[in-house]
Image: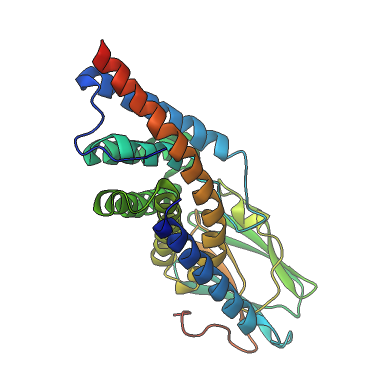
Amino acid sequence: MKRLDALVIAVILAASVIAMALLSATRDGADADGLYAEVFEDGVLLRSLPLSEDCDDLVTTQRGFNRIVVADGGVCVAEADCGSKTCVHSGTKRLPGEMIACLPHRLVIKIAGGEAPYDAIAY
Amino acid sequence: MRVKASASGINVGKRGEVALIGVFLAFILAVGLLERMVPLDFLVPGARLGLSNVVVLTSVYLFRFRVTLLLVILKCALLSMLAGGPASLIYSVSGSLLSLAAMQLLVRCLPGRIGPIGVSAAGAACHSAGQVLAACFVLENMGMLAYLPPLLLISLVSGVLVGVIVQQTVPRLRALERAGMRR
């Protein structure tokens, strides 16, 4: 292993750890009330579901469907007809700024409201 | 062991080269398909090991650039047909090409000063970055960038692992070349 190898590793390690620390710092201390799960398709806001109210919402687009369930202040994709099912496996999200993405359906569910996290890179 | 890039490609003759490309492509597809059975979704959604980069990086060291480019394009096309589906194509193409560009530049521009581990780590990071950037554009949502830091961390681990493997494979494949010359 050469000196440049170590440098590359150190730079990537530092960049990712610092970025993760910044992201989690902006998420901490956010008020759990007043949060919404915003559902985007192709960057267009389709719905805004308050996390305080349980609901079971079938979002159907021309690419397929995603069943979005809000329960206990968190949101998850319970079911989808996409190929990878990565959105379903993402589990439940409850913190502002957290996301679930379904790439095949070009769908993003993002938790917004409360203290807006990382405004600098969101839009 | 010294790992050096060859300027003109491995010298095993035209037919030998075609045969090696075939073996490399078969290897990439096998590893790529096996990898899909090891989902790392619990770490970051959509994360994968990226072990097929062993083959791509070995090819960067052994072959001319166009051969590696062909290999990478075929890998993206065939893997999306076999497993990922058309939606995955743009992510694999953007990640793979950015990664290949970074690795090729590092190997050719800093020969002897950077080893396979550094090249592989940089390539893996660029692969993640390319995919996340593609997702930002496709979904028109810059918030996707939030996935990048944890992906970078995972890609660092697998990138170093790939580098360690490539450090072993390249000198062994060079021995093929020497064996061919004796004939």
Q: Estimate the x, y position of residue A13 in percent, counting from the top left.
A: 53, 65
Q: Of residues A100 and B25, which is closer to you in this image?
A: B25
Q: Is residue A94 above or below residue B112?
A: below
| Quadrant of image for the N terminus of chain B | top left
Number of disc labels: 0
> Which residue is depicted at the point 66% across and 55% down?
A88
> Which residue is depicted at the point 61% across and 50% down?
A85
Q: Is residue A10 above or below residue B23?
A: below
> Which residue is depicted at the point 38% across and 29% down?
B24
Q: Estimate the x, y position of residue A19 in percent, counting from the top left.
A: 54, 74
Residue A7 lies left or right of residue B153; in this view the side is: left
Regarding residue B30, the answer to whether it shows in the image is yes
Residue B95 lies left or right of residue B34; in this view the side is: left
Q: Is residue B144 above or below residue A123?
A: above
Q: Residue furthest right?
A: A72
The coloring applied to the image is rainbow
- Answer with the quarter of the image where residue A22 lies: bottom right
| Quadrant of image for the C terminus of chain B | top left
Q: Is residue B179 above or below residue A12?
A: above
Residue A54 lies left or right of residue B156; in this view the side is: right
Regarding residue B25, the answer to whether it shows in the image is no
Q: Estimate the x, y position of residue A57 in percent, counting from the top left.
A: 67, 66
Q: Of residues A88 and A26, which is closer to you in this image?
A: A26
- Answer with the quarter of the image where residue B98 lies: bottom left
Q: Estimate the x, y position of residue A95 in percent, counting from the top left.
A: 68, 77
Q: Of residues B85 and A24, which is closer to you in this image?
A: A24
